[in-house]
Image: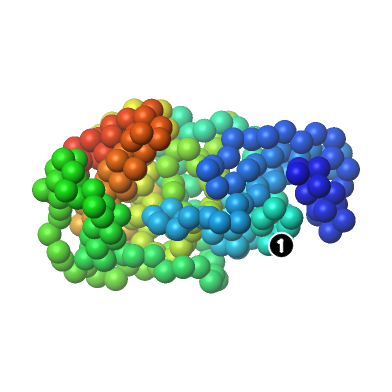
């Protein structure tokens, strides 16, 4: 199938003679290869025809649009091309980013987030939920029938109170901005996997990155208080930071609901994954208690 796809892309003028095609780690809903030739080093990302929705939807056209509009910002990989009608599913090509998954460096990371949230993008992108009541409703929808289970009941006891906040200035939000989607190489630091971007509240990305549950899912310990403070100080946007403590419990509650749902839905299918999500939910609920 890969050979057929490469031949098709070559006929479209997307790439030249391939010297090496190596699989990379991808998600559940895409396959990823590194294509190298004499004058190029590209990532080929092919999306499944039937991609999920939910909290982290797979939106191929939106990812392509985000990369295209973020060129020149040092936020994302350099966009190459997008082929929505490729054989086997939509294909996105972008320049390969060498390096490794995020392991630390709070100041550089905060500046990466600030560059993203300051980027002048035109869209169109989906509109994200930014107010407490709709965030709670989303969490309830995610929990669904799992609300009656022990872990769901525990989380429901931590449900923040309904309230209304001022409207946040809309910015481009990655939404899946945990350490697994940040690549470091020396002094360079870059986001990858913009497959569920939207226009919304910068705090959503901050809460995702600060989430102890998200860090656990990537095999990392929770951030210390000192690391978090360094990150927030380096981010430096006073308006966003003033809003963060008020909206953070709602984004954290929704993340915890997602972890609970994944824990129960993976039981009997992949118990290792289920246990990872159980620990993530427990860590997130501890963090949620501390910010209520």
- Which colour scheme appears in the figure? rainbow
View extreme (front): residue: 268
Instruction: Give whichever of 199, 153 is nearer the camera.
Output: 153
Q: What percent of the width, then of the height, locates residue 13?
A: 85, 56
Residue 39: x and y in percent read 84, 42
Q: Do we see residue 271 in this rendering? A: yes
- SS class of the residue under badge 1? loop
Residue at 69 percent across and 39 percent down: it is 33
Judge by depth and name the residue closer to the eye, 139 or 110: 139
Res. 65 image quadrant: bottom right
Foreground residue among 60 and 235? 60
Say if 187 sits above or below 249 in the image. above
Counting from the top left corner in percent of width and height, residue 28 is at 53, 43
153 displayed left or right of 73? left
> Image point 81% across, 47% down: which residue?
4
- In percent of width and height, residue 170 lies at 40, 67
Q: How many labels sit on residues?
A: 1
Quadrant hosting residue 70: bottom right
Q: Residue at x 54, y 66 (%)?
A: 121
Q: Nearer the viewer, residue 144 or 58?
A: 144
Query: Label 1: how many residues lie within 10 Å, few (<14), some (14-19) or many (20+)?
Result: few
- Residue matched to label 1: 85
Residue at the image point whose x is 87% and y is 56% from the top: 11
Residue 211 appears anywhere in the view:
no
Decide: is 222 above or below 181: above
Left or right, 90 with respect to 256, comes to: right
Q: Is residue 137 above or below residue 205?
A: below
User: Is 267 on the left or on the right of 39, as rendered?
Assistant: left
Quadrant containing the N terminus is: top right
């Amino acid at each position: 199938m890969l050979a057929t796809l490469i031949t098709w892309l070559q006929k479209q003028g997307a790439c030249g003679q391939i010297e090496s095609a190596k699989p990379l780690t991808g998600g559940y809903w895409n396959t990823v290869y590194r294509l190298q030739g004499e004058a190029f080093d590209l990532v080929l990302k092919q999306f499944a025809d039937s991609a999920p929705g939910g909290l982290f939807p797979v939106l191929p056209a939106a990812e392509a649009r985000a990369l295209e509009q973020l060129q020149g910002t040092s936020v994302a990989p350099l966009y190459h091309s997008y082929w929505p009608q490729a054989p086997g599913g939509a294909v996105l090509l972008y320049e390969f980013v060498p390096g490794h998954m995020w392991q630390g460096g709070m100041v550089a990371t905060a500046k990466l987030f600030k560059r993203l949230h300051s980027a002048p993008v035109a869209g169109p992108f989906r509109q994200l939920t930014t107010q407490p009541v709709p965030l709670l409703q989303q969490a309830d929808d995610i929990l669904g029938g799992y609300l009656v289970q022990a872990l769901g009941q525990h989380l429901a006891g931590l449900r923040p109170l309904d309230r209304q906040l001022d409207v946040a200035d809309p910015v481009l939000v990655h939404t899946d901005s945990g350490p697994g989607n940040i690549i470091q190489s020396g002094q360079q630091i870059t986001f990858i996997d913009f497959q569920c971007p939207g226009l919304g509240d910068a705090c959503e990305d901050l809460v995702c990155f600060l989430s102890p549950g998200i860090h656990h899912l990537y095999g990392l310990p929770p951030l210390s208080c000192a690391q978090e403070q360094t990150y927030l100080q380096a981010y430096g946007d006073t308006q966003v930071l003033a809003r963060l403590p008020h909206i953070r419990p709602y984004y954290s509650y929704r993340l915890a609901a997602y972890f609970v749902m994944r824990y129960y839905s993976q039981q009997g299918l992949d118990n290792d994954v289920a246990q990872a999500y159980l620990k993530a939910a427990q860590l997130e609920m501890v963090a949620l208690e501390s910010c209520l």
